Every structure is written in C-alpha cells, then in structure tokens.
Image (tube, rainbow, N blue to C red):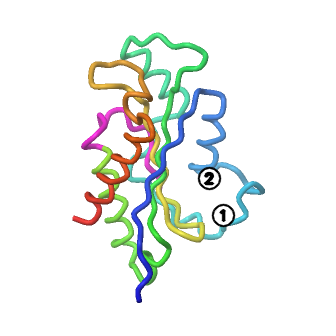
Amino acid sequence: MEKAQYAIMRFAKYKGPEIGNIEAHNERTKEKYASNPDVDTSRSKYNFHLVKPPGKYRAESERQIAAAGCRTRKDSIRMIETLFTASPEFFKGKKKGEIKAYFQEALDFIREHQDPKTIISAVVHMDEKTPHMHLCFVPLTADKRLSAKEIVGNKKKLTQWQDRFWEHMVK
C-alpha cells in the first residue's frame, strides 16, 4: 500500500524583533545554521525566489503598515510566515521544474486569498532534507486593517485554510 502524501501549509505570526532572524534564515545570510543542522550550505545555490524581497522584511512590513494608515501596538502582528511543503515522498524523483510548479501553485493559492502586494518574499529552500517554501506577508485586510486574527483566524479557520489548500493543490 502506498503511503499517504500530504500538501502541508503552516502559519507563524511575528510581532517585530524576531523578523530579522526569520529573514536571516529564509534569505540564507548566516554562515552557519547551528539551530538547524539540516541546512546543507553547499546546496544553498539551488534555492530560488518566486517573490524577491524589495528590501529588509521588517522595513517592508512597517512601510506597508504605514502606507495603509494602520496604527500599531507593541503586540501587533506585523508579518505572517507561511511554510509550504509536502510529504518527502512527493518530491522523490521530481525535476526542478516540477518542484517549482508545485510551489508556484502554493503561491497562486495565497494570492487568491491575500492581496499579492502584501507578500514580502517567497523563497524555496532546496538545501534541506525536503524542499519547502517560506512565504512572508503583511496581514493587511482588504479594507486596509492590520489583522492577523481576521486573516489566519482561530483553529476552525486554520482547518479551513488547510482543507482549501489541499483541494487547490490536488487540482
């Protein structure tokens, strides 16, 4: 019997100070990755962007928030990072073009549900055990409010996100 394969999407919310660390990991600006021994820096040259960041993640999120006219508090969520991947078996034997097509579909999925202009970066890591994409965006609503709660929601809404993502990727 063939092992079940999964399309995986996970959200993480960030308030500010840690955004620089997320950027350093995603953009591979560190020399060593002690916290993540799976990173094989000799393969980092195979990583690629589907959305290149216009500058520093934190500065870009603050710029978008200011442009939308949002007031922030110290505990405001300024960026959401979405991790996309699949079961390791899914990627076995796939060519780079097929892997890129998978992550392009994941990016298209987010663009259907979030203003594409809020996306800061979408980078695919090919230098770890399983290919995956880190996609970072500013949680601005359609009416220009900063609200991670409205976009990502509670446990029920997270389940809906997961189901819709799976349905999208199966198509």
Q: Residue at x 35, y 46 (%)?
A: 161
Q: Residue at x 44, y 29 (%)?
A: 148
Residue 120 colored in magenta in the image: yes
Q: Residue at x 34, y 64 (%)?
A: 102
Helix, strand or loop at mark 2: loop
Instruction: Count residues near mark 2 (Cα–Cα under 10 Å), then give few for <14, some for 14-19, many for 20+.
Output: some
User: In front: 32, or 108?
Assistant: 108
**Residue 39 — which label?**
1
Q: Residue at x 43, y 15 (%)?
A: 66
| Of pointers 2 and 1, the one earlier in the residue sequence | 2
Callouts 2 and 1 close, C-beta under 8 Å: yes
User: In front: 162, or 64?
Assistant: 162
User: Can you name the residue that lies furthest to the front here?
Assistant: 156
Quadrant containing the N terminus is bottom left
User: Can you name the residue that lies furthest to the bottom here?
Assistant: 1
**Residue 28 — which label?**
2
- Numbered circles on residues, count: 2
Horizontal side of 132 relative to 24 (left or right) equals: left
Q: Residue 37 occupies which quadrant of the picture?
A: bottom right
The amino acid type found where label 2 is placed reads Arg
User: In front: 14, or 166?
Assistant: 166
Instruction: Count residues near mark 1 (Cα–Cα under 10 Å), then give few for <14, some for 14-19, many for 20+.
Output: some
How far, Cα to Cα, is label 2 from label 1? 10 Å
Q: Position of residue 19 (x, y in %)?
A: 60, 34
Residue 77 colored in magenta in the image: no
Q: Which residues are magenta?
A: 111-123
